[in-house]
Every structure is written in structure tokens, then in C-alpha cells.
Image: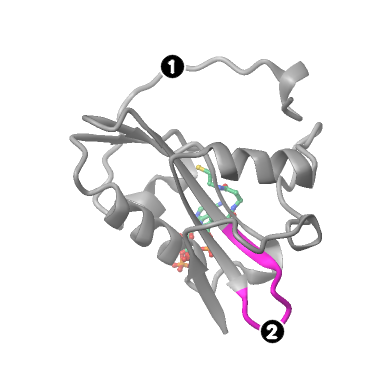
Amino acid sequence: MIYYSGTTDGITLERLTGFFVGWPNPPSPEIHLKLLQNSDEIVLAVDDQTKQVVGFITALTDGVLSAYIPHLEVLPTYQKQGIGSELVRLMLEKLKGYYMVDLTCDPQLESFYARFGLKPMSGMGIRNYERQSGH
Ligand SMILES: CC(C)(COP(=O)(O)OP(=O)(O)OC[C@H]1O[C@@H](n2cnc3c(N)ncnc32)[C@H](O)[C@@H]1OP(=O)(O)O)[C@@H](O)C(=O)NCCC(=O)NCCS
């Protein structure tokens, strides 16, 4: 069974492994925990049996109009079971009071996010790859 949590209480570094798949310079579990703690909103998917975090989504907000979703990931062995969808659904519920809720994604994920009412928009960004592992 998977349960969903909005807090990092009780989440140890050992329970935060395996994420940032494919990132050349991935954040450590320490940085991942800091990222979760510093986010305005989070939802974690946790395996009830192992207590491992198997998925997460984060959001940053200005508390008034705007929210941004920087991260969504489900561990590969837990994908295609509806966990990613539930994380998005629960986060959008948390953010439903905001005028703008934005994220960026690869074109092939547009159909996934469209299921929740998100629409394609053009965006701009910069990636400082030498800072990819965080600080
Ligand atoms: C995107 C992601 C979070 C989905 O999690 P999940 O638990 O597998 O999602 P669900 O089981 O709820 O839904 C699966 C759906 O996701 C979509 N999907 C997932 N990854 C996809 C990809 N790379 N390309 C296209 N569609 C994808 C499929 O449409 C699939 O649809 P189906 O149910 O008809 O098979 C997961 O694939 C993941 O962690 N990917 C790597 C990180 C990532 O890309 N994050 C998003 C950043 S914007």
C-alpha cells in the first residue's frame, strides 16, 4: 500500500534514495531532504511496508497569486500504478486557491498533465548544470 504525506516528519535519508534518475549530477539524499523542507508545499508517496519514499512532488508559491511545481518523480519500479497522478491531484488540490499554477515539462508529458486540466504554454528557462546537485 502507498500512503501520501504532506510532511517530511520521520523521513530519514535512508528513505530518500533512488531519485533524480538520469541526472548526470544528481542531488544527494541530504540535498533532496533540504529541497523538500524548503518547499512551500510537498506531497510524498510512501510505501507502507518499507517506509521508503517512492514518489514526490513539490511546489513554491508567493502565497497570493502564483505557484510553481518544480519537481515530480516516481521511482521507476513504482511507475505506471497511478502514483504520479495521485501526487499531481493532491498537489493541485493544495494549490487550488492560486490564480496561476505553472510547471515545465518535456512535450511527451503534455498529455499526462492535460488530464488534470493543465494547458500547454510557452516558457523560458535557464539551467546552470554545474549547480545541478544543489547546495
Ligand atoms: C511522469 C511520472 C511522474 C509519472 O508517474 P507514474 O506514477 O508512472 O504516473 P501514473 O501511473 O499516474 O500515470 C502513468 C501515465 O504517465 C504518462 N507518462 C509517464 N511518463 C511518460 C513519458 N516519459 N512520456 C509520456 N507519457 C508518460 C503516461 O501517459 C502514463 O499513461 P497511462 O496510464 O495511459 O499508461 C513518472 O513517469 C516519472 O517519475 N518520470 C520521470 C521524472 C519526470 O519525468 N517527471 C516529470 C517532470 S515534469
Task: Say which quadrant the N terminus sits in.
Answer: bottom right
Q: Which residue is mark 2?
A: 49
Count of marks, rendered view: 2
* Magenta stretch contains residue 54: yes
Q: Which residue is mark 1?
A: 124
Name the residue at 42% across, 66% down: 86
Please give the range of residues in magenta.
47-55
Residue sitting nearer the eye, 5 or 103: 5
Q: Is residue 111 left or right of residue 84?
A: left
* C-alpha gap between disc 1 and disc 2: 41 Å
Residue sitting nearer the eye, 70 or 15: 15
Q: Which mark is residue 75?
A: none
The answer to whether the residues at label 1 and label 2 have Cβ atoms under 8 Å apart is no
Q: Quadrant of residue 12?
A: bottom right
Residue 75's spot in the image, x, y percent?
67, 61
Judge whether 57 appears above or below 105 on screen: below
Residue 8's spot in the image, x, y percent?
59, 56
Judge whether 116 appears above or below 32 on screen: below
Q: Quadrant of residue 28?
A: top right
Query: Identity of the amino acid at label 1?
Result: Met
Q: Secondary structure at mark 1?
A: loop
